[in-house]
Image (spheres, rainbow, N blue to C red):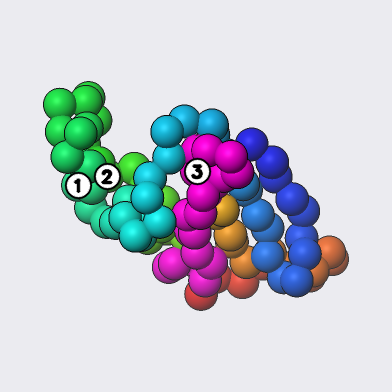
Amino acid sequence: MRVSGPSGGQALVRVADDGPGVPAGRRELLLGRFARAPEHQNVPGSGLGLAIAEEIARLSGGGLEVAGNDPRGLVFAFRLPCPAEGQPYTER
């Protein structure tokens, strides 16, 4: 996991793994509620974690993106607005 400070008005938390990954055409589905790949239907969990994180980021003026990790796995980038140093944070 890598956390970046304010840059371009945003803070970034980036998490990468080296697991089996997800095909490019199915990655956006991971951000939906109750998302489950057919091969993971019997794995513990509700499939809500990424959907909740994406909603929090979006409502805060940021976002959550998913991409492939080279040579395998996934990378998630969680972005939130971050005021410039010395500036107060204002809620949206």
Residue displayed at 34% across by 60% down = 25
What residue sits right under mark 2 in the picture?
48
* Residue 27 quadrant: bottom left
Residue 77 position in % (x across, y down) = 56, 53
> Which residue type does callout 3 highlight?
Leu
- What is the secondary structure assignment of the residue under circle 2? loop
Checking the image for residue 34, the label placed there is 1
What residue sits right under mark 3 in the picture?
74
- Residue 67 visible in the snapshot: yes
Q: Which residues are magenta?
A: 58-76
Q: Marks 3 and 1, how far apart in space?
A: 19 Å
Viewer-closest of 76 and 18: 18
> Which residue type does callout 2 highlight?
Leu
* Residue 39 quadrant: top left
Residue 64 position in % (x across, y down) = 48, 58
- What is the secondary structure assignment of the residue under circle 1? loop
